[in-house]
Amino acid sequence: MSTEIVPITGQAVVASNGVNALPSLVEQGGNAARFAWDEFFYAEHHNPHTQKAYMAAVKKFLAWCEGQGLELLTITPGLVGQYLVGLGGSAAKRNLHLAALRGFFDRLVQRHVVILNPAASVRGVKDTVMEGKTPEITIDQARTLLASIDTSHLLGLRDRAVLATLAYTACRGGAVAKLRLQDFQSDGSQYVLRFQEKGGKSREIPVRHDLEGFIRAYLDAAKIEMEGKDSPLFRAGNGRTKRLTGNAMSSKVICELVKRRLKDAGLPSRLSPHSFRVTAITDLLTQGVPLEDVQYLAGHAEPRTTGLYDRRQKKVTRNIVERISI
């Protein structure tokens, strides 16, 4: 059998009617292979982003294998390794593809489609991350952004409440998008926001006084407090009418909101909703708040992850580069 590498293409596997189809190698593997496919992608992975990324990775690999004239039973660890080398890109990208292949072939082994998992013994690419890539928004920039919003109308009140929620809870834009009316509630002594985070985690974050005021001003103007408790907290707008729909804002819409408000305030466009998370974590650590407390606020399972957001000692100042004697 030839092991000559055929260039990898991004061609999707699509049925003749335009609907995504099972890869040919899975179809050829019979009912057990089809069952493994369904089990891995639809029963094991419920996060739509993970499901989409893993499915794209596995489809791309199987299309490449089909181009080599391979069958599921003839795929070897060496071929998986060669494929990953030819894939190129960042270490994170190749490790994601490897994780998808390991998981999928594990299912094929369990369903007796193949004898051994050819991806199990393939080593991942070492990916040492010292600092996250998300740029932080400075405290002054964040204050400028919040102060720049015209709150004489409903969408301005909503946007200020969304931005303040990002700034004062250190939560992800996706978690803010999922908030429902029932998630803004009083525990008897203070108001809290209950967030649904990545991995199905649920956390309550106390609402500071100014954020409570921003959310209440928005709710009073929107007149939605008496709606069903499962209704979205932050609603999407209806074009240029400055009115709200009944639909929740998506994480994409929240990102667009942030970008639009940054532009209006004359602030750098490279900033994003995640920039608030970086700044909140760095600011609290700078003030001496214990790492474990900041880790809990951020919802990280490991303190090392929280450390990736810490920008205190990882800045190269202009004063340093001006001293280079070239």
Image (spheres, helix red, strand yellow):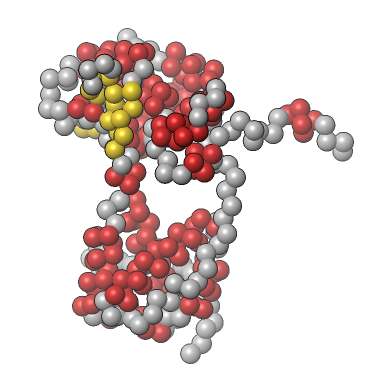
Q: Residue furthest top?
A: 152
Q: Nearer the viewer, residue 146 or 113?
A: 113
Tell which of 292 and 231 is nearer to you: 292
Query: Measured from the top left, where is residue 261 in percent x and y?
Result: 43, 23
Q: Residue furthest right?
A: 325
- Residue 149: image x %, image y %? 40, 15
Left-right relation of 223 to 3 = left
The residue shown at (26%, 16%) is 189
- Of 320 and 53, the residue lying toward us: 320
Rendered location of residue 258, percent (x, y):
42, 28
- Across and down, in percent, residue 168 comes to 41, 23
Instruction: State whether residue 272 appears in this view.
Output: no
Is 90 situated left or right of 298 in this image? right
Q: Quadrant of the C terminus?
A: top right
Q: Is 166 situated above or below 46?
A: above
User: Where on the picture, by quarter, is residue 230?
Assistant: top left
Q: Residue at x 59, y 33 (%)?
A: 311
Query: Seen from this angle, which residue lies furthest bottom?
Result: 1
Q: Relative to 326, is 106 on the left or the right?
A: left
Q: Nearer the viewer, residue 305 or 134?
A: 305
Could you tell me which residue is drawn at 80 percent across and 30 percent down?
322
Does 33 sit above or below residue 21? Answer: below
Residue 202, picture quadrant: top left
Question: From this viewpoint, is residue 320 visible?
Answer: yes
Query: Total of numbered circles in the picture?
Result: 0
